[in-house]
Each structure stands twice: as C-alpha cells, then as structure tokens.
Amino acid sequence: MLKVAAYTSDGASQFFDEMLGIGGTPRPAYETLVRWLGSQTRTSLRQKQQEADDIFRRLGITFAVYGADQANERVIPFDLIPRIISAAEWRFLERGIEQRVRALNAFLFDIYHRQEIIRAGIIPGELINQNEAFLPEMMGFDPPGNVYAHIIGTDIVRAGETGYYVLEDNLRTPSGVSYMLENREAMMHLFPELFAAHRVAPVERYPELLRQTLGSVAPLYCDGEPRIAVLTPGVFNSAYFEHAFLADQMGVELVQGSDLIVEDGALYMRTIRGKERLHVLYRRLDDAYIDPLNFRADSLLGVPGLFDLYRAGKVTIVNAPGTGIADDKAIYAYVPEIVSFYTGERPILENVQTFRCSIDDERGYVLDNLHELVVKEVHGSGGYGMLIGPHASKTERADFALRIKARPSNYIAQPTLALSTCPAFCPDGVSPRHVDLRPFVLVGDKVRVTPGGLTRVAMKKGSLVVNSSQGGGTKDTWVLED
C-alpha cells in the first residue's frame, strides 16, 4: 500500500500544501482522497498511469515544443491524482474571477473609446497608445454586447490558506481547455469509484456553453441560428489539437483562411455544397495575421477584407481584435486599479507584486535583486523569454540585466512565488509538486466560469515552472459541490 503518511511538503514554513495541514492532518476536502490513496499500491497506480498515457497518445492530445534541440510533438504529461477545491473556496474564486473579467472588458471598451482611465491619471497614456498590443483600428468600434474578450483563461496561484493571487490574464487566444475536458474524461474512466465517493462539479458542458456564448454575440442582422466556425492557423500550430477538438465538440466547422472569402458584404465558407455564410468566427490566430489587407500584408493565414467586414458589423470575431492590450504584462500591474475604477469595488483577487522596469526606481530595484526575482517579457507567453533568478547562473542574470537596460519597457519582474503544492504520483510514490490553476471564463449574454479549470503542475521536484513547454504537466481539478 502507498504510505501517504510519508508525504511531506517541500518545507512547511515556505510552501502551502493543499492536501495536508499542520501535523500532516488531511484538509477536509482531501480526507476521502487520502483514505483512497492509502488503499492503493504503487504498482496499481503505475498501471493506471500507463493506461492514461496510452489514452492521450491514442487521442493525439499533443502540444508542440519549439526549439531545434527538442522533439516537435509531445504528449502532455498527465498526473493521476486530482486537485480538489472545496465549494466555499470555489465560490470565493468565482466571485473574484467574474469581477476581474467584467472590469477588463470595461477597460477594453474605454481605451477604444474615450480613454477615461487615462484622463483620470490612473494609467499613463503612452503605456496604452504606444503599446504594440494596442490596435488603433479598433477605436470607436462597438462590438456586439460591448464584449471584447469572450473567452478568458485566468492564471491563479495559491500561497496560503486564503492567499489566492492572479498571475496572468489571458485574453488573446487562451488555450488549454481541451486538456481540462480530456483530463476529466480520463479520470472518470480510470477511477470511477473515486468519483462515486465525491460530489464533483461537472465540466463537460463547456463546449455547449461555448457555442451558446458564441451564438449570443452574433451580428445584429443575423435573423436565425448563427453559423459559427473555428479559424485555425493550421496543423503546425502548437494548439491545433484543441482547435479541432473544440470545433468537433461544438458541432461547427474548423476552417483555415484559405477556406473563407469575403464577398458582397458577407463572410462565406467554401464547401463542397457551395458557399455558406458565416456569422461568428472563433479565431485562434493573432491579430497581425487575421487580414492581410489591414495588418500584415504577408499573412497567408487570414482572410482579405475580414477586418473591414467586422467593423461594418457583418461578422463577429472572437476574441475581438485588440484584446491583447488587456493581458499585456505591463498593464497587468494596473489591474487592481482597473477593477476599482470600473466597478467601484476593492479587488477580490489580488495581483502578484509587480515591478515595472520602465520606471527608474523599480528598474533599479530589479537590477539589484535579479537573484531573487522572476523577470518576464511583457508580451511573452508559454514560459519563454523569462528569467527565474534564484535558479539562473550569474551569466544568465548578467545577460538579462543587459536586456533590461536596453529595453526597459519590455520587462516586468515579480518575486519568486511560494506556489502551493499538491500531491502527484511520481516514480518514488506520492510527492508534493507545485501547481497553478487556469479557470476558463465565457463572456457573452452572461459570464460563465467553468468550475475548476486546468491545473498545471511542475513535474520536476522543486521546480516552480508549470508550463507544458518547459516540462510541466496537467491534472484534473475537482470542485466539490455542497
């Protein structure tokens, strides 16, 4: 049998463990899981792990890793032991997430209209108007329902009993929801008896709710059932599996730019039955590539004339072009003020302390303390282009110092977080591993927060990097119902 009693966190004074409290006592949400783990053997779990790996490999659940010395396609590591969140904890998170996404959508509407937040002196105008993620072409345009970010992934970390913090807001083309859904399917197949012992909030309605959300923001002229499609860059994109998966689950078409044509003031999809009109396009490619007539002229991925059609109100693009300004890491530092400005409320979920290298005093602090900080590019993602100071060499820190001095506005820095730990099945048994959480939010006729989301886990002992591109894995997230 597994010796769960031998499970210890990586230093109780430094890291909060989500399964065990003081003295190794299971927290209430984990009591049943702890008993269940104690009844398992390492051999039986190893067999289940192999079965899970075979399932994901057979389904083709892969992601691309970029780099000449790395394999291109990999099966994302999956951990068998679920992360459990109590109903009370989830209600708190849900309130905080909804408050935040409403404020960010209000912020997007404002900066593309009167820019009241700049007039109020809360955010410097140059931080928005000179930001490469800001899209001047969106000025004065009202998207359906005034919703800019319809699909959002909010990255949350935990550092204590009530210490939840937002690490990032992903409003451009957030990914990972397919892993959330497939992880749940795998767990229900592998451990039905464990599910029967818990009241777990379902996540399987996400594709249905996604389709409802997309339909709710169809153009005003659309009379009947809106026709929806997912626009993908193609099979070589790192998230192509997810594009195809979501299109299939929603029962809509998966298209590439070459499948679409703008004609007679409408967007059409070429099919073997002839042209079919589209009303909503869930795009999974960046702003610069959606329309070669308005943005990058060399783009072969987008549709000529699409943006003009969008501005004319003849098609809805999800997420709206220009939403990337709201998840820019330089803007992130101002989100608490953004929440207060647009809601009149104190933020329920706080930010991680952030130092802006564009500000002289804060840059000086960062340069003096690189050995203690995590430095990120303001437009970076996927764990690329970042420095983890405590784990970096003197040479790496010196190189980053030069980069910061050369382009200070391109970097922010944050303290190295004491990320919470959760149990994971490792070669040496059940051991603590650091985790974060990406709940997925749908914004249309209403705000819908999927219970749980994607838990990403650092599979290497002691590692704080959870990104799949950097060796991290995923686990199922269980929100318990009352």
Image: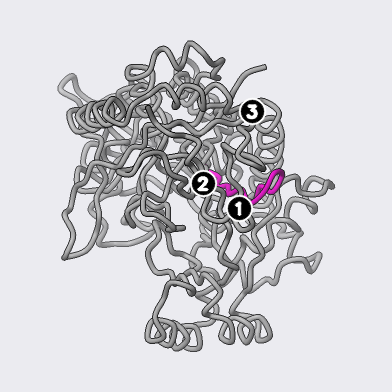
- Residue at x 31%, y 28% (from the top left corner): 45
Q: Main secondary structure of the magenta part?
A: strand
Mark 2 or 3: the one toward you? 2
Residue beneath label 2, please? Answer: 8
Return the residue nearer the eye: 77 or 147: 77
* First reached walking from the N terminus: tag 2 or tag 3: 2
Q: Position of residue 148 (x, y in %)?
A: 57, 43
Report the magenta residues as a range: 153-166
| Residue bearing mark 3 | 86
* Dot 1 crowding, Cα within 10 Å, few <14, some 14–19, many 20+: few
Q: Which residue is mark 1?
A: 12
211 or 54: which is nearer to us?
54
* Label 2 – label 3 distance at C-alpha: 21 Å
- Tag 2, which secondary structure? loop
* Above or below for 213 versus 340: above
- The reply to whether the C-beta atoms of the residues labelled 1 and 2 are less than 8 Å apart is yes
